Amino acid sequence: MSDIAIRAQNIGKQYRFGGKPAGYRTFREAVLDSFAAPFRWMRGERKEVNTFWALDDVSFEIKHGEAVGIIGRNGAGKSTLLKILSRITKPTKGRVDLYGRVASLLEVGTGFHSELSGRDNVYLNGAILGMSRKEINRKFDEIVYFSGVEKFLDMPVKHYSSGMYVRLAFAVAAHLEPEILIVDEVLAVGDAEFQKKCLGKMEDVAKQGRTVLFVSHNLGAVANLCTTAFLLQSGSVVLAGKTSDVVNRYQSLASSDNGFLTFEHIESDAFFTKISVCDKVGNATTDISVVDNFILRFEYVVNKKMKNLDVAFMLFDRNGSKVFTCSLSRAEGEYFTEHKPGKFIAEIPIPAKFLAPGMYFISPVIHQPNIKIYDLKNQALQFKIAETGSMNYRYAGTDVGSVLVSFDWKIQELINIDIDNKLVVSNE
């Protein structure tokens, strides 16, 4: 038996912009289009076909028992690759061979039927994965306990929050013993405790000789879980190898950003259009001196009046560890009672000498806490806090953590030690 779990050979995926994709036209549309074509030619019109390659000429082999991380910027092709490996979509060119049963968790609620209860969906997903009812029964209690949704098990999943969805979906995917487990960034929806449980479970899966593919912007989680990694850029694998080498290459590429990212409008009631890191005079940049103030700026759209809408961001260090979370609603005291529609710019001033020198990632989110996430940009923008040449603030080579603090110190001079080794403090 071959030790190869996944073999990808020159796979590519092409998408078309606008209009209806080829192969999905009705007979009436095809006839009308053929009659109209000569007239478009006479008027000098040309029917342009806009396409792009989400993946282009990607080849690799993954062995049984390997835990492989896939990292890259938003739009690099990570999710497209996983959808091809999960047989959700076909490649435009090339082929993929999978040797073993595959379980995938790519989007919240993938494979769930919204009208069925959580209990029914456990059996439905198990059947989709090729499990017998007897096998599902044997694992059922363990799945439910891991998910933590016991109280809501007989409720239709359409009433679940995003966190509850992903808890149950991951529990099913990980406990039904697939030979290949594929997990996308969807785990970011869960809370920190649940993410820790998921990473522990994926480690167990890998130790049992099964294969794990893990896509995440949490570089610390990738480094801890995965022995090897792929770096995707513009639909191609630019580096494959030891995880630490791939992570370092990714960080060096990310440091060449210009300090801001813009985003296309999405089908959501609230979404980000631009995020920026700005210096103290408002210019976008990726390099901030440790002794300078700077600004984080988030531009977003709200399409309708909503209650308890919150805009927040999480800051991560280069190892993927969360430094802190900052919430606009909490800054106002409690969650907003109501957020009006419109276009908005939120600016957060960050004081000088607060973050230690190093690389940082920003993950902004618009959500109704514990209800729904409208837009989440996972570690979308990177910036660097640079050490200064001044010896007064030089922190290079010192393990000071991620946050610098400067408390008021009170020092009293000790002027004497008596024969009983008791300290005597000056009263002057």
Image (cartoon, helix red, strand yellow):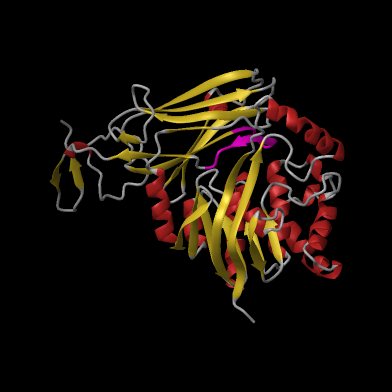
- Residue found 55% across the figure and 28% down from its top: 273
The relative height of residue 221 versus residue 412 in the rendered view (above or below) is below
Residue 348 placement, left or right of 51: left
Which is more toward the observer, 377 or 11? 11
The quarter in which the C terminus is drawn is top left
Q: Is residue 252 visible?
A: yes
- Residue found 70% across the figure and 46% down from its top: 108
* Residue 123, horizontal then vertical, whole percent: 83, 59
Residue 38 placement, left or right of 404: right
Q: How many marks?
A: 0
Q: Residue furthest front?
A: 42
Magenta stretch, residue numbers: 366-378
The quarter in which the N terminus is drawn is bottom right
* Residue 201, horizontal then vertical, whole percent: 62, 62
Residue 47 placement, left or right of 264: right
- Residue found 70% across the figure and 67% down from its top: 178
Q: Is residue 193 visible?
A: no
Q: Is residue 112 magenta?
A: no
The relative height of residue 176 versus residue 107 in the rendered view (above or below) is below
The relative height of residue 108 versus residue 280 in the rendered view (above or below) is below
- Residue found 69% across the figure and 49% down from its top: 166
Which is more toward the observer, 76 or 131? 76
The relative height of residue 344 versus residue 54 in the rendered view (above or below) is above
* Residue 83, horizontal then vertical, whole percent: 66, 53
Which is more toward the observer, 63 or 170? 63
- Which is the main secondary structure of the residues drawn in magenta? strand
Which is more toward the observer, 187 or 266? 266
Q: Residue furthest left?
A: 415
Q: Is residue 372 magenta?
A: yes
Residue 403 placement, left or right of 234: left
* Residue 177, horizontal then vertical, whole percent: 71, 68
